[in-house]
Amino acid sequence: MAQAFSLCALAAADPRGTGGFCRSGWLSGPPVCENEEGRFRLSPYVRLDDTIVAVSTPPGRGGLGIVRLSGSRAREVAEGLVRLRQGHQWRPWGASLAELCDPEGRVLDQVVVTFFERPRSYTAEDVVEISCHGAPVLLRYGVERALECGARLAEPGEFTLRAFLNGRLDLTQAEAVRDLVEATTLYQARVAAQQMEGALSRRLTPIKERLVELIALLEAGIDFAEDDVPVAEDAEILARLAVITEPLAQLAASFAYGKLVHEGFTLAIVGRPNVGKSSLFNRLLEQDRAIVTAIPGTTRDLVSEVRALEGIPVKFVDTAGIRPAGDLVESLGVERSFHAMADADLSLVVMDLSAPLDEEDARLLERARQGGRYVLVGNKCDLPGRAALPEAGSKVSALTGEGIESLRRRILETLAPGDMQLEAGFITSLRHEQALKEALEAQARARQAVEQRIPHEMVLIDLYAALQAVDFITGVTTADDILNRIFATFCIGK
Ligand SMILES: Nc1nc2c(ncn2[C@@H]2O[C@H](COP(=O)(O)OP(=O)(O)OP(=O)(O)O)[C@@H](O)[C@H]2O)c(=O)[nH]1
Ligand SMILES: [Mg+2]
């Protein structure tokens, strides 16, 4: 029998329910559809009984390439394109030597097939991985042959979607798979690996348990009002609410750091000519990237480079020295410096400590104060000083490297105060932050209702809303469009 899941937010229809997928009947139709912008996306009604196929290795030529199959007919389909070598059999969770053959049975490649028997596989379905030599023509042939043998092409992220729908992963873990694939630093990979292993879900579990306990307490008070079960005291409800709110708020606040880890940030180095911006840029990159001379006005255009700072990808931007420009080229450069400053997540405002500060320094600092986050840097601290910084800042020498380490720390602390040591269980996605904010707002409403002695039936509505928001994060309840959005950002074959 054909089988499909319609993913709907059950809890939305039933505020008392803690949700779950509505596994309703079939809706036929194409497995994919287009959204308003015409972009390809997963349909909420993907046929999950199909056996799917995709090339799981990146496009292009390589030593190896993997064709992956998942579904109840994975082995049968694989048998249509590979022939096991003599003495080899299909062994669950084991690799076997085989030959990829053309339809006439002529050998095209020697391959290794690995059979992961359900439910102990990535998707919790039968999975076969065919590891060929990485010639695009072989991989394409493998996929085409699998299609002829009854498989269909996997949608982006469909292997992980199936793992999620089959209960192998929760939504935070599925998102972590994508983050791991997209990681550009080992630190990002470590954070994603922790989330994949369930760090965030583990942090949410006790919060959710307490919320459910509180709901049960209030429900009991309502259901058994005429019996002997005592109605919960307001003071107790408020105390229990506070215990739930604190970790939720901490987790929501961890997004400041999590966002940095996930997305990285842009840092613009600005200042008057000759204060040592390019020298500092080179020093932070640990590379002789930008031209440095004693002539003021050396840098005339933006120079940028991405480097990891404590495992966080940072786009460093060196800019032209800011002063009333001498010629057209310089004035265009100065204009770009101001744009870079406005676009950056953080500006390093550099001043030269070996010379008296002037009006241009003060004007720039004022602009930085109005514009957003900045760190004031006094450079050339190796020279006899003639200037003091107008406010607290980092004293460094781009020439000798003095103070650079503490400047690096200060940069990170300015962008993400606190939470720096927190490696496990912080949130890295806007989706999580929004859900946590919703949960916090619902909690605040519940608290207010209790304080105003509003009947517990009303308080419960807010508590259920908070519970639903927490469940959104792990995917216990979720809406189709959210799933579409998440899994459509995956690459094919994952
Ligand atoms: N003693 C000393 N000299 C430095 C230091 N940093 C930079 N300099 C020198 O200052 C001069 C200007 O350095 P740059 O890095 O080109 O300065 P800049 O701010 O990029 O200058 P423009 O590109 O012209 O705006 C060069 O001669 C550097 O060697 C420092 O920390 N100590
Ligand atoms: Mg320069």
Image (cartoon, helix red, strand yellow):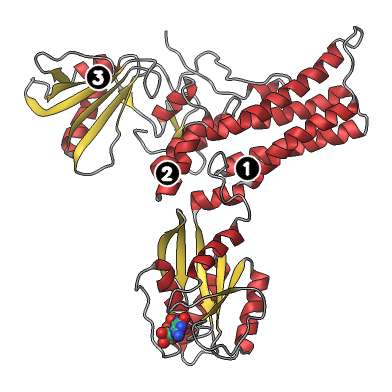
Residue 455's tag is none
Q: Secondary structure at mark 2?
A: helix
Please report contact status of discs 1 and 2: CB closer than 8 Å, yes or no: no
Query: Left of 490 or right of it: where is 432?
Result: right
| Quadrant in the rendering for residue 279 | bottom left
Disc number lying in front (1 or 2)? 2
Tell me which image quadrant ligand 1 sits in. bottom left
Residue 33, picture quadrant? top left
* Placement of 278 over or under 208, stated as above or below: below
**Quick one: label 1 or label 2, which is nearer the N terminus?**
2
Which residue has dot 2 on it?
A: 189
Image quadrant assignment for residue 76: top left
Residue depicted at x 24% and y 29%: 143
Measuring 21% from the left and 14% from the top, which residue is drawn there? 90
Mark 1 packing: few (<14 Cα in 10 Å), some, or many (20+)? many
Figure check: 100 above or below 407: above
At mark 3, the secondary structure is: strand
- Residue underneath mark 1: 433
Residue under numbered circle 3: 94
Q: Determine if the C-beta at disc 1 is less than 8 A from ligand 1.
A: no
Tell me which amino acid carries mark 1.
Answer: Glu
Q: Give, as a three-letter code, the residue at label 2.
A: Ala
Residue 398 is left or right of residue 376, and the answer is left
Badge 3 or badge 2: first in the primary sequence: 3
Q: On the rendered image, what quadrant is the N terminus found in? A: top left
Q: Amino acid at mark 3?
A: Gly
- The percent position of residue 135, horizontal first and vertical second, equals 16, 39
Q: Would residue 175 be visible to someone looking at this image?
A: no
Label 1 residue SS: helix
User: Considering the image in quadrants, where does the C terminus appear?
Assistant: top left
